[in-house]
Image: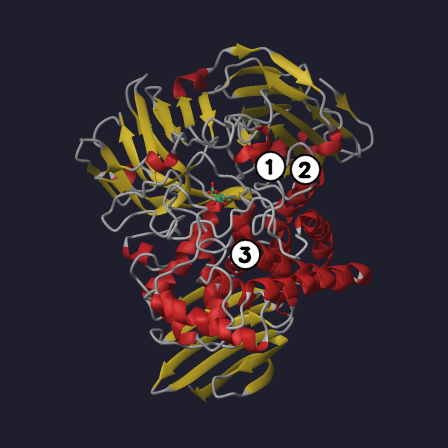
Amino acid sequence: MPVSASPVPVSPLSEAVFLSAEAAEGVAPRFTATVPLTALRDDVVTATLWATARGVYEAEVDGVPVTDSVLNPGWTSYEWRLTYQQFDVTDTVRGGHDDVRLTLILGNGWWRGHLGFGDADADYGDEIAVAATLEVVYRDGSVQRVSTSDAWGAAASDVTRNSLYRGQSVDARLREGGAPLAVRTSEIDHGVLAPQTSPPVRRHEAVPAQRVWRSPSGRTLVDFGQNLVGWLRFTVQGSRGDLIRIRHAEVLEDGELGVRPLRSADATDEFVLSGGVDAFEPTFTFHGFRYAEVEGWPGELRAADLEAVVVHSEMARTGRFSCSDPLVTRLVDNSVWSQRGNFLSVPTDCPQRDERLGWTGDIAAFAASASFSFDTADFLDSWLQDLRLETEHAPDGAVPFVVPAVLKYANFPAGHLSEWAGPTAIWGDAAVWVPQALWQAYGDADRLAAHYPAMAMHLSSIEPLISERGLWERGNQFGDWLDPDAPPEDPAAAKADAAVVATACLYRSASFAAEAAAVLGNDAEAHRWRGLAARTRDAFVRHYVDDDGIVRSDCATVYALAITFGVLEGDLRSRAAARLAEIVRESGFRVTTGFAGTPYVTWALSETGHVDEAYRLLLEKECPSWLYPITMGATTVWERWDSMLPDGSINPGEMTSFNHYALGAVVDWIHQVVGGLRPAAPGYARVRVEPRPGPGIEWAETSLRTRQGEVSVAWRVASGELTVEVALPDDVPAEVVLPDGRTVEVRGGGHVFTSTL
Ligand code: RAM
């Protein structure tokens, strides 16, 4: 057992080795060591445990968990950045025994266990491992360090099967002692170790079961009333060896669990009873579910027997919104739930099927919305560190479709996504748009500087693809993904011309990169990107816009992007806006946009004098629309406009999630335009209050805990007059823009305004 008293080493884990066990893939090994303290417990000043894993681990000192965080070390781009955690265990060591007992339990996590979709089996490796160091500092200044080594023992824990997608099996009989396992050690690559900067993944509230009943086929079903991400927790007593099996699903179909959308993710947990009172909580997996099917429960299952534990990365809730239309309020709440479920270590597309990957395009669309509802600064910064690392190491120099880029290990059949490569609009633009959202929300110039290199890499990777005409019309594009008019089996078959979408996105990204370079004092780069932006805009206008202002492919998405990103100006902009408003009216206010256009279509309308159309689009309830899912009982944002069809059946497309935040990106517009609370300078150092009332909403209340303090805006329309109440932190300036044409400058405190409409 290496016990040293040398000065604090450079890496807190430099004396540790990785421990692995010879065990079947599903078994979670438990590693233990018992070490005598070198001085009296009463003399312990501090005791700290550092740990990391290739996999996920749980650590205990004297049988006490060292943390209430779960799924450590989380998911990062492990090849270049494996994070370690630090836990203060002073109280446990002081209050424990003269011999300290260290325990590490190791699960597969994101390292091993068939990540990716289909039969991808995108594993980082076939061996999982864990490492830790306990450091005890005594009153006399001496330091004792205990690290993982070949002196540690291992045995099977009570976890007999564990997979993020497929679920977990726990055999409580093994709590009496599992079979011993042979231990292997290996060196840690200290070059990739880094302290964790993403907030820890934690258990949040417990949601009680609302209803237990029998399905038409006689199965026992439970409804938690909310589509959420986490797992079930319960205590039970039954006959030794009896098995309880729990399956999870987001929706019901024909009165039974609708598991088809989960594809190969079984999301099935199993619990074998010891005969005594057993507490169960499967913490080496997670599920996206509202419903559970319980088989083998001893006796009659009652709602009070089970609770659902909500699990996600820790983030402070900063933004709130409510308004007179309860469906719109619910839409915003649904986006909050989808963010919670999909901000679990990395920002994912969905939390339930065999995917759960850091799809770049999804967060490119949703980052601004997310950074209002919650403080996402550390969470998204950590992910952007990985985006930069992955891009630096990508063979084609392009931002990968998913970060961490685990699909590079996938065994896809020929013709699949694997043959796709190269820079992609929206998805690759995450390198620019996510930092842009963070800059607007938090105004952190150091972070902007850290994110700048990936912006430059993204743009540099596109440059060779720009055609002689100055357009981004070469390479692969997802385009306006999930256009509601695309057939279920072909989500890329959009109305919007993919090159028009890509060229507009290039303009936006080059423009923001220029702004970022200027903020960072890099004039040469600012000049370079400004030039690229200007050339791109000229080419767009010349080749894609005709004399009547009609943009090629003439659908809502191309107008939304060209207007919101600032590609069109003056007369062309007004003509494009009039055409967009016409398309929106002609579509009967149903949504006609996919991933690309949806976040911007209401912006493009409201910023060009078409507020009424924007409101009608927002408030439409027929499918496809934002409110249609809510009329169908949705409690999270759906992947497809019609993930559930009006007859209650599940969309036949093989990609049908009920918890996908991307199409919820309209909430950024709801906060800023309906709510009227916008940043006038990065980080809300200056606030713009500009509520834009429209037909169908009589009042709205919006608040945001900014870096400067709490800002709130409440407005109400009565008798043709608007009343706006504004509250600002001390000394924070705001410009209040009223419908009667006045702009009033205020600073700090509470203010009330009335205006004609
Ligand atoms: C799907 C994902 C994601 C999207 C990609 C292109 O598999 O769920 O939402 O970004 O495809």
Amino acid tagged 1:
Ala
Q: Left or right: 244 with respect to 254? A: right
In whole angstroms, how far apart are the C-alphas of marks 1 and 2? 9 Å
**Figure check: 242 above or below 730:** above
In whole angstroms, how far apart are the C-alphas of marks 3 and 2? 24 Å
- The residue carrying mark 2 is 394
Q: Which residue is drawn at the image coordinates 30% and 19% (left, top)?
A: 242
- The residue carrying mark 1 is 405
Quadrant of the image occupied by residue 732: bottom right
Quadrant of the image occupied by residue 377: bottom right
Q: Which residue is drawn at the image coordinates 35% and 76% (left, top)?
A: 695
**Figure check: 326 above or below 493:** below
- The residue carrying mark 3 is 501
Mark nearest the camera among 1 and 2 is 2
The label on residue 477 is none
Q: Is residue 301 visible?
A: no
Comparing 459 with 668, the one in front is 459
Q: Crowdedness of circle 1 by 10 Å Cα count: few (<14), some, many (20+)?
A: many
Q: Left or right: 213 with respect to 705? A: left
